[in-house]
Image (cartoon, grey):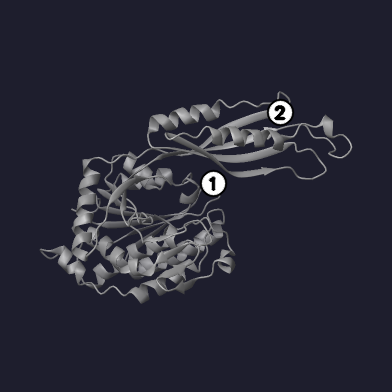
């Protein structure tokens, strides 16, 4: 690297339109978490792009019926095993295959729409573009760079947490290209999150002929949903996002299943919320309620090393021509795991936009180049 690596990064020839075209190719490859074959197709595409950059590609098999992962290591003069920079990103999305029909890839002025274009294919793509431009310029990063692309982040990373933590432990710094904050800032901490699975079991009967003999699992679950969401406070929130029950409209429902999520800024508050969820009881003695805890993301609170990483990023952004704030954020990411381990982590380094997880998801096209340049500046500066 030159004596002033940021000056070198400022000269890298990022091309907004070429980047947008490449990103749209990724967005066109739909990859919802629960469709392992679709996610594997997206991993194939990204692995090929990384291989073209000269990375050594490793495919890690999936578990729990999820797709696998891609680990890409770039050549470096440092001895094998030297702790470096881990770029941590996911390629699974919340949008089912077919969403492109309702959310087609389209550009309207400074906005470009498409499923997962913001969360987080946009950020992942600009991270690769940052690496591409550094390599094309013949620049050498101070530390080795590894990219880990995972497949189940959108459901809490149940099959990849151990891999993420093991890989991060071998690195000095973790960079996560999740979307930028609405302010354009980055993320230096994330709230704790817990998921829960609930099941009510009632007693069936013919809904037309013998309604009174039945005990509806759906009715009890509805009562639980209202009670759960009423537990929300400023310290700990509760929401139910999935509910399924019954099979025939003329039969009192025997089973009903739901999924709930709790989020807190402090681990102690989440632990208290978990205890409240696990202590829930059925309001009807003839209907049983089971509550089991699902995946959890630990709270990540910034320390001085994280703030030093932020200050470095802010200084780079200022030299590029913009400013970035920082914040702790909800809506967990895999940065929860690495940050909670005490590994300096900077999150929210992706593109700017809005509407993540909705049919209005879009990026701001003019954020592609400055955010990619910021990412390149970090890779060029972290020691």
Disc number at residue 21? none
User: In x, y percent, where is residue 190?
Assistant: 36, 43
Which residue is pictured at 48% across the width and 30% down the height? 273
Disc number at residue 64? 1
Tell which of 237 and 133 is nearer to you. 237
Q: Is residue 77 something that shows in the picture?
A: no
Which residue is pictured at 52% across the width and 58% down the height? 358
Q: Few, some or many C-alpha atoms within 10 Å of disc 2 (few <14, some 14-19, many ≥20)?
A: many
Identify the secondary structure beneath mark 1: loop
70 lies above or below 8: above
Q: Is residue 228 something that shows in the picture?
A: yes
Identify the secondary structure beneath mark 2: loop
217 lies above or below 250: above
User: In x, y percent, where is residue 249?
Assistant: 79, 45
Q: Residue beneath label 2, please?
A: 287
Q: Nearer the viewer, mark 1 or mark 2?
A: 2
Distance in Å between CA atoms under marks 1 and 2: 31 Å
User: Along the horizontal axis of the image, is 375 left or right of 4?
Assistant: right
User: Along the horizontal axis of the image, is 360 left or right of 206?
Assistant: left
Q: Few, some or many C-alpha atoms within 10 Å of disc 1 (few <14, some 14-19, many ≥20)?
A: few
User: In x, y percent, where is residue 122?
Assistant: 40, 63
């Amino acid at each position: 690297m030159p004596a002033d690596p940021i000056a070198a990064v400022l000269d890298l020839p990022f091309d907004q339109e070429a980047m947008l075209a490449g990103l749209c190719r990724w967005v066109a490859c739909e990859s919802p978490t629960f469709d392992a074959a679709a996610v594997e197709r997206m991993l194939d595409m990204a692995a090929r792009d990384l291989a073209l950059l000269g990375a050594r590609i490793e495919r890690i098999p999936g578990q729990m019926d999820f797709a696998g992962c891609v680990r890409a290591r770039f050549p470096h003069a440092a001895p094998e095993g030297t702790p470096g920079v881990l770029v941590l990103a996911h390629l699974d999305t919340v949008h089912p295959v077919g969403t492109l029909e309702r959310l087609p890839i389209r550009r309207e002025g400074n906005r470009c729409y498409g499923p997962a274009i913001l969360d987080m294919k946009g950020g992942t793509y600009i991270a690769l573009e940052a690496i591409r431009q550094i390599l094309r310029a013949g620049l050498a990063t101070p530390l080795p760079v590894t990219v880990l692309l995972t497949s189940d982040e959108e459901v809490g990373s149940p099959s990849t947490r151990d891999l993420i933590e093991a890989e991060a432990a071998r690195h000095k710094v973790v960079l996560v290209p999740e979307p930028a904050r609405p302010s354009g800032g980055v993320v230096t901490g994330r709230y704790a999150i817990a998921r829960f699975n609930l099941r009510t079991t009632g007693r069936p009967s013919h809904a037309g002929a013998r309604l009174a003999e039945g005990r509806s699992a759906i009715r009890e679950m509805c009562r639980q949903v209202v009670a759960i969401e009423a537990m929300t406070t400023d310290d700990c929130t509760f929401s139910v996002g999935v509910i399924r029950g019954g099979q025939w409209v003329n039969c009192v429902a025997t089973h009903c299943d739901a999924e709930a999520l709790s989020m807190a800024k402090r681990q102690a508050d989440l632990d208290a919320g978990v205890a409240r969820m696990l202590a829930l009881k059925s309001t009807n003695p003839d209907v049983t309620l089971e509550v089991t805890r699902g995946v959890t993301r630990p709270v990540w609170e910034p320390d001085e090393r994280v703030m030093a990483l932020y200050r470095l990023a802010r200084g780079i952004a200022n030299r590029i021509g913009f400013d970035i704030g920082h914040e702790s954020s909800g809506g967990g990411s895999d940065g929860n795991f690495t940050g909670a381990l005490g590994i300096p982590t900077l999150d929210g380094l992706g593109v700017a936009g809005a509407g993540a997880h909705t049919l209005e998801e879009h990026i701001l096209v003019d954020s592609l180049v400055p955010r990619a340049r910021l990412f390149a500046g970090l890779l060029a500066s972290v020691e």
